[in-house]
Image: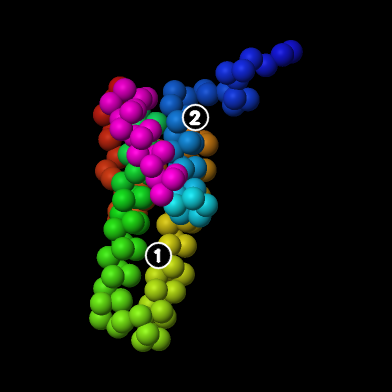
Amino acid sequence: MRHSDADTGFDERIPGQNLAVIAESLFLGNLLVAPGICFAVLLWLWVRNKDDAPALARHHLKQATYVSLWGGLLIVTLSALFIAFGGLYWEWTWVLVIMYFTCIHSTLVCFGAYALSKALAGQIWRFPLIGPAVDRRPE
């Protein structure tokens, strides 16, 4: 049996599942592979699909975008504070920056992997503390 060019090899049993998987993959890509580039694509997808995407895709797009914004805000704010109070040459500045990456950044990566597994399963999931509220309205 020949596959068409549009066939991704993934049977979307739940509406919006492919877009949900792409959103969570871009979230992880933003954290691990190509920061900024993956975020720009994610933001574009969210703006383009936030109103008319199926509920599953809409939730994962919103969550991945919001949590990416929170992660960016955290890294910029905390790094600026560490440098402002300690300076570039104070050893504790770098201890705090490394602790940030070890604790907060790696936690976001772990939660992102879990969110991706939920998207692959066709389920919704909310990041603790910084994830947007889950919309439980019927479609």
- Asked if one can make out residue 48 in the rendered structure from this viewpoint, the answer is yes
Q: Which residue is mark 2?
A: 18
Judged from this view, the residue extending furthest toward the right is 1
What segment is highlighted magenta in the picture?
Answer: 36-54
Label 1: element kind: helix
Q: Are marks 1 and 2 in contact (CB under 8 Å)?
A: no
Instruction: Answer above or below: position of 23 versus 87.
Output: above
- At 28% from the left and 26% from the top, the residue drawn is 51
Type of amino acid at the residue the image marks with label 1: Ile
Q: Quadrant of the N terminus?
A: top right
Instruction: Answer above or below: position of 139 versus 43.
Output: above
Q: Is residue 124 left or right of residue 52?
A: right
**99 or 134, which lies in front?**
99
Type of amino acid at the residue the image marks with label 2: Asn
Sequence order check, earlier mark of 1 and 2: 2
- At 25% from the left and 77% from the top, the residue drawn is 84
Q: Is residue 109 left or right of residue 96?
A: right
Q: Which mark is residue 104?
A: 1
**94 or 118, which lies in front?**
94
Classed neighbour count for the residue bearing mark 2: other residues with Cα under 10 Å, few (<14), some (14–19), many (≥20):
some
- At 62% from the left and 18% from the top, the residue drawn is 5
**CA separation, marks 1 and 2?**
28 Å
- At 33% from the left and 56% from the top, the residue drawn is 72
Q: Which mark is residue 7?
A: none
Q: Residue 66, image x and y in percent? A: 31, 46
